[in-house]
Image (tube, grey):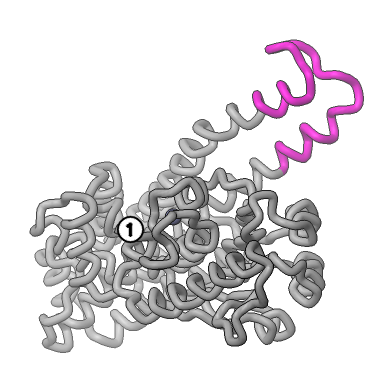
């Protein structure tokens, strides 16, 4: 079991990263022994990982980071990335001192979110291997934060490695991506995802096959669907929605429920993390538990509250986005039935509903509905109020 085993259906990418990690290790070893570095190296200081949602772009970057920090005594022979040594383990769980992760907490990564990380990128790694900076949502860099990254990537410290993750190379500034080596992940096959669920999660093969088919190569969603009853219930509720859009009242109610469910998701996550974060910050600022904060710390607290608010907004949007993905899958199946193709039905478990909707409409009306869902997604991207956007969509799904 190595770090590459976590990458589902990405054999080429694993090979590419394994080769680079071996060369990176050779560089570190040569420097430690004071011998000249190997002449040719597949290692470089800036990488851009891209791939469709669910393909495991961030996991691939993190696996690579782990391999770069691997200190397994066997690494020269078996290749770095054992998955178990101190270096691999702490990188995978996110506590390695020389691996910094930047995640967008809102719709954008602001310059202040990047400031400490950029500063760190100019320093040497404490552990003597690599200073790894992993940017999870590089497509959310705004002009200022992207410029800060560009400067850092242009003049890297000798042992610094930038790992940028984005859906596609077009999502990253040309000036940045031209300095990166590109690693492109593809959508893993349904069979590969099902196989992983059985082998890694111990999921029953039939459940694994259904979850993999329903999520169409999205590894995390398949895992959640196969292992979390609440996720199955959520998806079932979304897939019942098309049958409830008979009148305007039904459309408005369905829209409200979708938005409420997403808000509940965001709230649950916030309750888990916000209170703990706030307490930690207060403790760090020197307040007695529940006591008054020292003077002059209001600004720092306000900054944390702003971050938490941005994160709630993002979670709600991500959750809504998931529901829209399920809905699109539903109508894609309806279209397949209308066109007489049964082969690639993703949501076989709701076939009766698919049949009913297919009989009541035409391929043209189904295409219009799929477009209405895409329009809703666009509206959410443009920060239209969620309820307005979703109501417009459910009304259009009915009128289709
Ligand atoms: Zn290791």
- Residue 301 lies in the magenta-colored region: yes
- The image shows residue 340, relative to residue 101, as above or below, that is below
Residue 239, position in %: x, y? 25, 59
Residue at (58% x, 77% y) in the render: 43
Image position of 304 (left or right of 396): right
The front one of 288 and 391 is 288
The front one of 220 and 333 is 220
Residue 48, position in %: x, y? 58, 76
Residue at (15% x, 62% y) in the render: 210
Q: Which residues are magenta?
A: 279-306
Residue at (41% x, 78% y) in the render: 13
| Quadrant assignment for ligand 1 | bottom left
Residue 52, position in %: x, y? 43, 74
Question: Is residue 143 visible to us here?
Answer: no
- The image shows residue 11, relative to residue 199, as above or below, that is below
Task: Classify mark 1: residues with Cα within 10 Å, few (<14), some (14-19) or many (20+).
Answer: some
């Amino acid at each position: 079991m190595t770090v590459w085993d976590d990458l589902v259906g990405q054999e080429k990418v694993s090979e590419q990263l394994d080769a680079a990690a071996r060369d990176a290790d050779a560089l570190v070893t040569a420097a430690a022994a004071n011998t000249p570095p190997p002449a040719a190296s597949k290692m470089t200081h800036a990488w851009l990982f891209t791939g469709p949602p669910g393909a495991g772009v961030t996991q691939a970057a993190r696996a690579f980071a782990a391999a770069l920090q691997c200190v397994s005594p066997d690494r020269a022979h078996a290749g770095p990335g054992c998955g178990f040594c101190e270096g691999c383990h702490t990188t995978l769980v996110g506590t390695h001192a020389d691996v910094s992760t930047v995640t967008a907490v809102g719709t954008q990564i602001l310059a202040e979110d990047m400031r400490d990380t950029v500063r760190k990128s100019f320093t040497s790694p404490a552990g003597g291997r690599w200073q790894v900076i992993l940017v999870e949502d590089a497509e959310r860099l705004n002009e200022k934060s992207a410029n800060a990254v560009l400067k850092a990537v242009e003049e890297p410290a000798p042992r610094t490695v930038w790992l940028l993750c984005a859906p596609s190379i077009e999502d990253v500034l040309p000036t940045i991506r031209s300095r990166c080596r590109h690693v492109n992940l593809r959508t893993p096959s349904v069979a590969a995802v099902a196989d992983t669920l059985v082998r890694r999660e111990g999921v029953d093969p039939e459940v694994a096959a259904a979850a993999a088919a329903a999520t169409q190569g999205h590894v995390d969603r398949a895992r959640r669907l196969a292992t979390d009853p609440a996720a199955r219930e959520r998806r079932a509720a979304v897939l019942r929605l098309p049958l409830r859009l008979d009148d305007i009242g039904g459309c408005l109610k369905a829209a409200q429920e979708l938005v409420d469910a997403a808000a509940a998701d965001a709230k649950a996550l916030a309750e888990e993390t916000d209170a703990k974060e706030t307490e930690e910050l207060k403790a760090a600022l020197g307040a007695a538990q529940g006591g008054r904060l020292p003077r002059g710390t209001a600004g720092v607290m306000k900054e944390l509250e702003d971050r938490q608010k941005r994160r709630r907004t993002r979670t709600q949007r991500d959750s809504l986005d998931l529901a829209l993905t399920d809905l699109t899958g539903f109508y894609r199946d309806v279209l397949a039935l209308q066109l007489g193709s049964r082969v690639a039905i993703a949501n076989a478990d709701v076939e009766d509903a698919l049949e009913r909707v297919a009989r009541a409409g035409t391929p043209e009306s189904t295409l219009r509905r799929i477009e209405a869902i895409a329009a809703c997604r666009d509206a959410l991207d443009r920060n239209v109020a969620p309820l307005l956007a979703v109501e417009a969509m459910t009304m259009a799904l009915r009128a289709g």
